[in-house]
Amino acid sequence: MTSGLSPEDYLSIGRTYYGQKKYEEAAAAFTNALSAESIDLYEHRAKCYQRLSKFEAAIQDAKSMLNIDKKDVRGYLRMASILQAMGKLEKQLKIYQLGLKCVSPKSEGYNTLRQRHDELQRKLSPPKSVDPCAVLPPEIVLMIMNYLPFKTVISCRRVSKSWDRFLTSYPELWENIDLRGARKDVGRIFFRNAVRYSRRQVKRATIYRFQHEDMLRNFAEACPQLADVTFVSRYPLAQSVLEFVAHSASLKTLVVEAEISDDVVFQILRTRTTLETAKFPSITPSRPDRDLWETPLPRLRTLFLQWNDSIHEPSPPAHFFRHTPGLDTLVLHRLMAGFVEHLRDIARLPLTTLEYVHSGPFDGPMSRILKRFVFKLGWSPEFVPEPYSTYLPDLTHLVFEGISFSRPDLSNYLKKLLEHDPTTSEQRQAAPLETFVFRDCGQEGRKVISYTSIMSASNRIITKALKVLDDDIQDLVDRRPTGLRTVDLSATKISGAGVKLLVDNLPVLQTLRIDDCPGITSPDIRQYAEKRGIEVHMKMYA
């Protein structure tokens, strides 16, 4: 070798010799260059020794690469390549496993390391192996795991060490932490590890049996992408929830399934005004600060409020819904009495879904773009709602339940809602309802089944607990409702003859439910319908 050359010169000379397949000269040049330790130089010399079948020397250079930087993927790949040339495949697999543990998934070459590990593992697996992590590509295993509940994924970690390594090395499996299936309190260590496995990329969480309330804030701060959170029973104290919400900057969806006071509800809305979906299905009445109801909520799209008890003292100030200009879905159960008088403001909202279950009347105008309207009363069979003044041209789902329609002209009531536009003198054709549900609505409710416009446009009708007779079925089929696919006539007065009328005259009927009908005394009608390809749900009347 020429004296006085720099390590870089020796490196260039060694590469030239290696390209000429003069491995002895190349190894000597790389040795002269090693006055300054370098992973590149050790790798080049190891490649030369490997070509010369000097495997022990090559292994020593690969070890030197790992000693310089255990997080550099090149040392593991070179060591594995040498062991493969020596025919030591079991040791090669262990080197891959060590590399997957030490190398960051974001490092260049990590995917190559993972791919070679998986290929070798499949190669070494017994021919009759049923271990999916060993015989299937990792992409397929991940796809399967993503369909499993979070609790099942946690259980799978106990199968073997290789399963545990696999499941904890893919952050996407830890983006949705669902503790709903926890059988005992969840402690700090689990949450700390879950956040680490996710690489701080948790996006959804269901909080249940949370042991340490002080961890909530740490969890929110450690997961900056957390956008969807649900609190179920045994949820923390209200103050902890408020603190959690305050530190969840990306939070868009919040559901609190356990009991919570309406005072805390509106404190939460005021704390995180960027919420898009807020659901509180178990609210206990209190006397919230009136200023909380005046909080602007410009991004709110879905609001679900359900009180455990109806209260009759007005609490909210007027114009609450003027602060929710983008509200699309509104669900109100057992509404606070003071709220009812302010529902006229919802006509200004771009609502497409309104569900209303309460203890008092509501006859105000509604959004004209409403597509789904659910109105349940249930507590007062004598109550008759006044006709709505709103014309709903886009309505596709209509549900009435527990309302006593005792007026003689029910058709006019429905036409008021579906066909009469008060802004013009024209009558429009009936709305193309996809679903029409009519439950427990009194004696005159049976007239709805012969309401021509609705029946001819709908493809799903539920008329549970109405006094529908076979004559009403005859009236229905005479209207030729050719689009009907689903019919529920449970707890009605029809007989097998009425069911046969439906089966013979509804060409696209797919599903028929006839539970608890005293007029049906034989299962023969079920067999008759099923032979024609109709799915029948039938429970004989006791």
Image: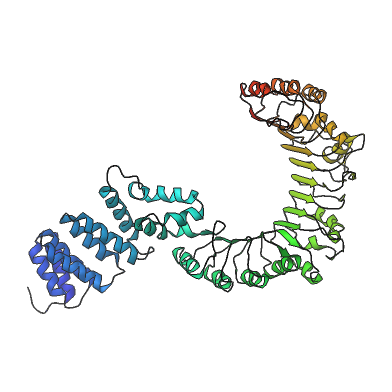
User: Left or right: 356 with respect to 74?
Assistant: right
The answer to which image quadrant residue 21 occupies is bottom left
The one of 90 and 410 positioned closer to us in this rendering? 90
Q: Is residue 493 above or below residue 63?
A: above
Question: Would residue 167 be found to the left or right of residue 397 on screen?
Answer: left
Q: Residue at x 63, y 65 (%)?
A: 235
The percent coordinates of residue 399 (x first, y second) are 77, 42
Outermost residue, front side: 542
- Rendered-image quadrant of the N terminus: bottom left
Relative to 461, is 301 above or below?
A: below
Q: Position of residue 189 (x, y in %)?
A: 47, 69
Q: What is the x, y in percent for residue 459?
A: 70, 32
The quadrant of the image that shows the C terminus is top right
Residue occupying the far right of the picture: 408
Q: Which residue shows up at 14% across the image and 70% down it?
A: 30
Residue 507, x across and y down, in percent: 67, 23
Q: Residue at x 76, y 28 (%)?
A: 518
Q: Is residue 515 visible?
A: yes
Q: Residue furthest bottom?
A: 4
Residue 306 location, quadrant: bottom right
Residue 297 seen in the figure: no
* Front residue of 6 and 273: 273
Instruction: Name the side, left or right, on which 410 lies relative to 12.
Output: right
